[in-house]
Image: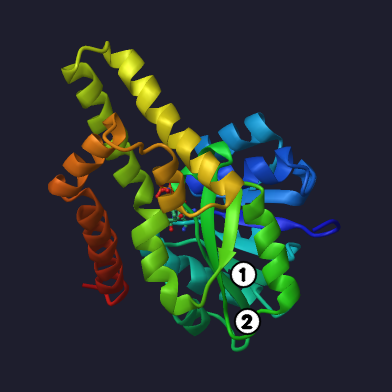
Amino acid sequence: MKGKKIAVIGGGKMGEVLASWIVSGKLLSSGDVTVADIVPARLNHLKNQYKVQVTGDNKKAVKDAGIVILAVKPQNMSEVLKELSPAIDRDKLVVSIAAGITIGFIQDHLKKGMRIVRVMPNTPALIGEGAAALAPGEHATEEDMQTARAIFDAVGVTVMVKEDLMDVVTGLSGSGPAYVFIIIDALSDAGVLMGLPRDIAQKLAAQTLLGAAKLFLTTGKHPGELRDMVTSPGGTTIAGIKALEQGGLRAALIAAVEAATLRSKELGKGK
Ligand SMILES: NC(=O)c1ccc[n+]([C@@H]2O[C@H](COP(=O)([O-])OP(=O)(O)OC[C@H]3O[C@@H](n4cnc5c(N)ncnc54)[C@H](OP(=O)(O)O)[C@@H]3O)[C@@H](O)[C@H]2O)c1
C-alpha cells in the first residue's frame, strides 16, 4: 500500500469508514487519501475529523490516485462511472462496494480492460468488525486482490469469492447484522419476560452473541461441538434447544438467507 494514493468517491457512511480506518490503521497517511462528495458539509466533516484531502470534483480526486474506491449509492453509479471514465486508465485499480452493481456493469461504463475488484462489506465495518467478501474482475491481478484485501482487512475480516456468489454474501453477511439485531432484541424481551431489567437483559444478550461468536472463531471447533459442551443431559440448555427447534429458528434463518439472496439476484436484474 505504501507509496499509493487512494481516492474515495462518495464520502457517506461507508466512504467515511474506509477513509478513517485507512488513515487510523496507518495503511496510508491522510495526505494520500482524497474523498470526493457532492455534499460540502460532508467534505468539511471528513477534512476536520480525519485530515484527509477532500474535493467536490470526482475527476480531480482520481487524477493522482492508484486506487479508486467507488462508495456512492448503486443508483448513482452509472452517472459517476460515465463522469470518471475518461480519467480512469489501466494504471488505476477500481474497487466498488456498491451493492448489486456487477463488475460487468462497471466495465461497460469504463474503457476496456480495466482492473476492477467488487467488494460486499457490512455495517460492523463501522467499528472495525466488518465481514467483507471480495471478487476479482477479469483484469484484476493477484497484487490488486492483495491491495483491496489490505483495505478491508483494516475494517474487519475478508474472504475471497467468485462474483456469482456475491448475492449469497449479501443475503448472509450483508443483511446478517439485521437478523442478529432481531435475535438480540428477542433474547432481551425474553429476559424481561422472565424478570430481568431491560438494560441488563440487552447487555447479557449482546455479550452472549459476541462471546459465542468469538469462542467459535478462536477455537475453530464445529458449532455443534461447542453447543454440546454446554448441553448436559436433562439440563436447562437442552430444554431451551427443544423450544428453539419447535419454534423453527434454524429453518427461519436458512429461509432468511435464501430469501435475501433471491432478492439480491432480483435487484441485480433491476426488478
Ligand atoms: N451502508 C452499508 O452498510 C453498506 C454495506 C455494504 C455496501 N454498501 C454500499 O456502499 C455504498 C455507499 O453506501 P453508504 O451507506 O455509505 O451511502 P451514503 O451514506 O448515501 O453515501 C454516499 C455518498 O455519496 C454522495 N454522492 C451522491 N452522488 C455523488 C456523486 N455523483 N459524486 C460523489 N458523491 C456522490 C452522497 O451524497 P447524497 O447523500 O447527497 O446523495 C453520499 O454522501 C453503496 O453503494 C452501498 O450499496 C453500504
User: In the image, residue 84 lies at what x, y percent?
Assistant: 57, 70
* Whole-number angstrom distance, CA of label 1 to CA of label 2: 8 Å
- Can you see residue 12? no
Asked whether the beta carbons under mark 1 and mark 2 sit within 8 Å of each other, the answer is yes
- Can you see residue 170? yes
Q: Residue at x 53, y 40 (%)?
A: 215
From the image, tell me which residue sits under label 1: 94
Q: Residue furthest right?
A: 3
Q: Residue at x 67, y 70 (%)?
A: 145
- Helix, strand or loop at disc 1? strand
- Residue 200's quadrant in the figure? top left
Q: Residue furthest bottom?
A: 112
- Looking at the rendered image, the quarter that the N terminus falls into is bottom right
**Is the distance from the Cβ of mark 2 to the nearest ligand 1 atom less than 8 Å?**
no
From the image, tell me which residue sits under label 2: 114
Please, what is the three-letter code of the amino acid marked with disc 1?
Val
In the rendered view, tell whether residue 135 sits above or below residue 230: below
Please, what is the three-letter code of the amino acid marked with disc 2?
Met
Q: Residues within 10 Å of mark 2 (few under 14, many from 20)?
A: many
